Image (spheres, rainbow, N blue to C red):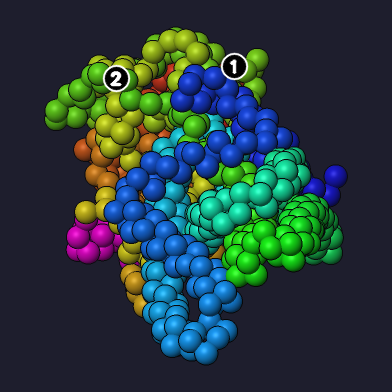
Amino acid sequence: MSALEQIDGGGRGGKPARTAGSLQRIPGEATAEGDVAVTPAGRAKLRPLMALLPYVARYRGRALAALVALIVAALTTLIVPIAVRRMIDFGFTADGIAMINNYFAVMIAVVAVLAVASASRYYLVMTIGERIVADIRREVFAHLTALSPSFFDSARSGELISRLTADTTQIKSAVGASVSIALRNLVLFFGAATMMVVTSPRLSGFVLLMIPLVVLPLVAFGRWVRRLSRDAQDTLADASAYASELIGANRTVQAFTNERLATERFGGEVERAYVAARGSTKARAVLTAIIIFIIFTSVVGILWVGSHDVLSGQMTAGTLGQFILYAVFAAGGLGELSQVWGEVSAASGAAERLFEILRVRPEIAAPAQPRAMPVPPRGNVAFSNVRFAYPARPETFVINGVSLNVRQGEKVAIVGPSGAGKSTLFHLLLRFYDPASGTITFDGVPVCDADPQEVRKRIALVPQDSVIFAASARDNIRFGRPEASDAEIERAAQLAHATEFIRLLPQGFDTPLGERGVTLSGGQRQRIAIARAILRDAPLLLLDEATSSLDAESETLVQTALEDLMRSRTTLVIAHRLATVLSCDRIVVMEQGRVVEEGTHAALAAAGGLYARLAKLQFQGV
């Protein structure tokens, strides 16, 4: 397997890549109804669009104004055939010249009303669409940020971004232009149909016979269109997810000279998206052709019957003209509906995909009545016979019966080989996951009984892979405590020994650091993360290989800063480099999810166990 295929197919801990559109099949994530969120992709209903009604209701005044403008525009359009009938029947005489002049003057006024009403409808409906989509994007993003880490163990970030962008754009098109056109043509169709019956009940009877020929293919093809549109959105999301993943790993792709493979793989994804979109468009084109042919063939048939009625004296030429105009309006309305139906069906598929996300409920949530955390916080931590397995591998316990007590102000190091479960202890303490059994307490309160937000506010974390955002150095540090002043930020940077290199950046603290801090070295990124943790000023400090990316000089400086920081708070330190934990009060040694040794460096080194072997390898180089 090539490096690129490893990135694409086996990324994030060896988990297999999921196909786009499979979000609803994520195991263990419950819907609002308490069921696993499984939604048949081919369900041909517009029900997902009903979920948009609460968003529309927020702007009911503007929606009502748009509806009034729509009705006014439709009614003014329906006045035109009446004027045409009277001009044909009475206007082409010497006495009818004055009447024609009056009618044309009235028609100009009608057209002016039509223009103003149409422009008002367009503005109101389009702005409602933009507003609703903005609200949905905001709520979906906020919901994503609140979901448990287990959700992101399976979800692909590129696919989620596609749903936030491409799917919401599809909804905007429907809620804006498509729904507006659909409502206009519905009003026009029913208004014209009513006037057809008033004008000539006999000819209207022939029209009624043609309606099933129009409605049946509209419904049948609409289901097909919706299914294909959903498939097209899914394949586009797949391509977006792949592109996001490969762009993020661009340096690895180039390092392994796999640019051609990346391009070919992405080209294949894009081609799949094109084929799916082409199928959806083809279905809509076929639907449009069938509907237009049926509608206007029926209009020709009615015109043939009506012309015979005029010749036989059963109706006037003006009445036939009026009826034909109403028939054309009704036919045009149905023809437009056939095209809009395809767009609305596509939007329904997009809405379904978006609301699938909103139906997912986080596995980690605050209890209905959370226990209050003690004030002031102390920083006492206790693990009692804790066992845990990640949801992706439920049969493998990465934490297996761990018991550990950490007192206020104590500095405890956790060491052991890779895969021993050290970082998982931090994940459980932060309540990213809940243990399968056992309890974890923070200041005497079981973390499962407390609000996760309140627990996490009392913790400062420096992760092994420091996360740097595409923002300024100042804003990256401020992420630790958003309300901090500039002076506090600069002091935190100074304590982390980050001021030296930040001052050398083109704009100092206001210099953008690039996506994932690409403009910084590994050690510089780590010092930004340490400054962020210092700024948080929490009673419990978690250091996960906090100095792993630093050179010897930087490590010495940062270690000094960390030791000053650790004096006033409880600290848990994960480290592979044992030289960084010699000053800790106690060292806990883990292997295969269990605590196998515990004590000071001197005691453990003399015991001849796992720690002694690790210390011998590192300190003696054998």
Secondary structure of the magenta portion, mostly? helix
Checking the image for residue 397, the label placed there is: 1
**Above or below 578: residue 4:** below
Q: Quadrant of residue 35?
A: top right
The x, y position of residue 441, in whole percent, is 32, 18
Q: Position of residue 208 (x, y in %)?
A: 68, 44
Residue interval drawn in magenta = 484-499
Residue located at (65% from left, 15% from top): 395
Crowding at dot 2, Cα within 10 Å, few <14 / some 14-19 / many 20+, comes out as few
Q: Is mark 1 on a helix, strand or loop?
A: loop
In the displayed structure, 12 sits above or below 127; it is above
Question: How far apart, in angstroms, are the residues tagged by discs 1 and 2?
Answer: 29 Å
Label 2, on which residue? 368
Q: Nearer the viewer, residue 582 or 464?
A: 464
Judged by depth in the image, the label closer to the viewer, 1 or 2, is 2
- Residue 605 makes an appearance in the image: no
SS for tag 2?
A: loop
Where residue 457 sits, quadrant-wise, is top left
**Amino acid on which disc 1 is placed:** Phe
Residue in the image at 39% along x and 48% along y: 56
Give yes or no for residue 492 being in the magenta stretch.
yes
| Residue 439: percent from left, percent from top | 39, 13
Using the image, tell me which numbered label, if any, was put on residue 543.
none
Q: Which residue is drawn at 40% across and 79% down?
A: 106
Question: Could you tell me residue 2's position as x and y percent?
Answer: 83, 49
In the displayed structure image, the side of residue 133 where residue 264 appears, left or right: right
Depicted 217 relative to depicted 68: above or below? above
* Residue contact between numbered discs 1 and 2, judged by CB atoms under 8 Å: no
Residue 102 visible in the current orientation: yes
Q: In which quarter of the image is the N terminus?
A: top right
